[in-house]
Image: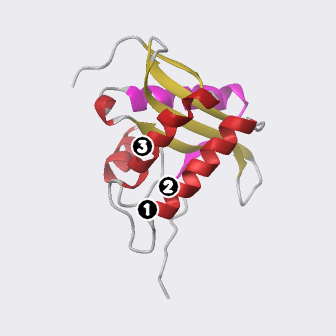
Amino acid sequence: MAEIQGIQIRVATIDDFDFIAGLLPRLSEFGLPAWRDAASMLQTDVAVIQNKLSNQPEGTKIFIAGVNNETPLGFLHIQSGSDYYNNEPHAHISDLIVDTKAAGKGVGLLLLNHAESWARAQGYRWLTLSVFAQNTRARDLYTRLGYGEDIMKYVKQI
């Protein structure tokens, strides 16, 4: 598919909440593990995004990718974190979602590149993200872009 021309990235505001909330169900459309409940995940994600947009905590940014800053196509939620083992600060992508109408047209890649630029500007050496094992399309993209697997989380229902 052809790339979308004129895409720009800007900081999200509370006025973007409805657009972002409308994309959050995409986080589970690839299929979730049996022990995950999509409705409760969505409820949590909506509350987190609303809180971050309303309070704009330090070290957290939400960015919107859109055509000429008018038609939103996707968003990036990135925040500061620290490594469990060495406590080194780093940037962590909490959410990256592209609207279905823009999927496969370079919007996600543009947002990932923006995340890297933001992380570098903050002085971080690392950029991390989490992805469900079932989300093979995203995992393939991250691998192609140079992300490496780190800690694998295993879950057993008891």
Residue 142 is labelled as 3
Counting from the top left corner in percent of width and height, residue 36 is at 45, 69
**Disc 2 crowd, CA 10 A, few/some/many (<14, 14-19, 20+):** some
Q: CA distance from mark 3 to mark 1?
A: 23 Å
Q: Amino acid at mark 1?
A: Ala
**Disc 3 crowd, CA 10 A, few/some/many (<14, 14-19, 20+):** some
The residue to which callout 2 is attached is 42
Residue 135, quarter of the rendered image: bottom left
The residue to which callout 1 is attached is 38
Q: Indicate which label's residue lies in the foreground, 3 or 1.
A: 1
Residue under the image location 48 percent in, 40 percent down: 96
As drawn, which residue projects farthest toward the bottom?
Answer: 158
Counting from the top left corner in percent of width and height, residue 15 is at 59, 27
129 in the magenta segment: yes
Marks 1,2: beta carbons within 8 A: yes
Pick whichever, 28 or 110, lies toward us.
Answer: 28
Can residue 146 be spotted in the picture? no
Residue 151, quarter of the rendered image: bottom right
The magenta segment is 107-130
Q: Amino acid at mark 3?
A: Tyr
SS at mark 3?
Answer: helix
| Image color mode | secondary structure
Counting from the top left corner in percent of width and height, residue 140 is at 34, 47
SS at mark 2?
Answer: helix
Q: CA distance from mark 1 to mark 2?
A: 6 Å
Q: Amino acid at mark 2?
A: Leu
Residue 78 is labelled as none
